[in-house]
Image: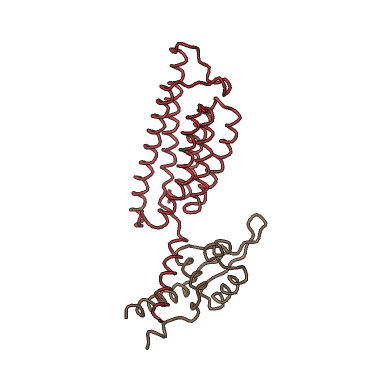
Chain colours: A brown, B red
Amino acid sequence: MSIITNINKAFDHRIRLGIMSILMVNEYADFKMLKELLGATDGNLASHAKALEKEEYIKVEKQFIARKPNTRYSITKLGKLAFQKHINALEKLIGK
Amino acid sequence: MESKKYLDDISHIKDMMSRSSRFISLSGLSGILAGIYALIGAWFAEKAMKSIAINGSRSYDYFSDANSIEFGNDIIFEFFLIAILVILAAMSTGVILSVRKAKRKNVKLWDTSSKYLVVNFFIPLLTGGLFCLVLLQYNLAGLVAPATLIFYGLACVNASKYTFGDVRYLGLANIIIGLVATQFIGYGLYFWALGFGVFHILYGSLMYSKYDRK
């Protein structure tokens, strides 16, 4: 039963899973890159990113590049740990 | 039922990780060397042309406009040979240096991102190569140089999504001078030297100082 508790509810959605996966292997990703890779709408992606930000799993930086607003996402230490735990739990569940 | 969902999740995670990661083992040094090979090739090609102009039975003015250019089969063959040698040298250098860099960084060279890179690079490039053969078939040799630059540029722009974004600018620069070259037919060799030679050396040194020398 203890394995089940390691399944993190915060990651229980395709788009959140996608955001975390991308940020695990990239130093950072901007909004457009995430949108293209995940095939999500603006609003959808923004709300899922917000949820992950609230958990402090990802960090959001807003800046201006050539006077255009740019939102950049990166993973936090906490996020990395939590996601790793989530993956391990998934793998164990499949292993059975 | 449940474990099917988890399995899907895992494969989704794997897919996102590999699709979002870029191929980073491309060495700046290979860009510089490719540029140097191209310049050497261009030098040989020019010598070949000049020797024909001097020794050929008819006087030969390769700077004249497209209609009067009639490349003989020998010189086309010679150009072809030089081009193939340059491409082979540049590619093998690129591969060898990438293998070395990948080993040093302890990453796998042949993974999803490098596969994407190679496939997407070669789609415009092979199209361009075949198109140039068609140009030769219809005796439009003057357009071969601009066409190779344009298609190579498109290949770089296309590949830039899967490796360092800077490749995009190399591609755009080559597309632009390829288009400019269409207006100066007969000077193809000089545009080649600029696009494949000078631009590669510039780009390679930029990449080398930006990513490799750390």
Q: Quadrant of residue A91?
A: bottom left
Nearer-the-camera pick, B3 or A7 = B3
Nearer-the-camera pick, B119 or B196 = B119
- Please state the horizontal and vertical placement of residue A81, each as a whole percent of the image: 43, 75
Which quadrant is home to the N terminus of chain B? Answer: bottom left
- Residue drawn 46% across and 72% down? A77
- Residue drawn 49% across and 37% down? B131
The residue sitting at the front extreme is: B138
Q: Quadrant of residue B81?
A: top left
Q: Is residue A68 above or below residue B143?
A: below
| Residue A42 as seen in the image, left or right of residue B26 | right
Q: Is residue A68 above or below residue A93?
A: above
The residue sitting at the right extreme is: A67
The residue sitting at the top extreme is: B57
- Please state the horizontal and vertical placement of residue A83, each as a whole percent of the image: 44, 74
Q: Quadrant of residue A30?
A: bottom right
Figure disc tally: 0
- Please state the horizontal and vertical placement of residue B44, each as a whole percent of the image: 42, 25
Q: Is residue A17 above or below residue B56?
A: below
Q: Is residue B77 above or below residue B106?
A: above
- Please state the horizontal and vertical placement of residue A89, each as a whole percent of the image: 38, 79
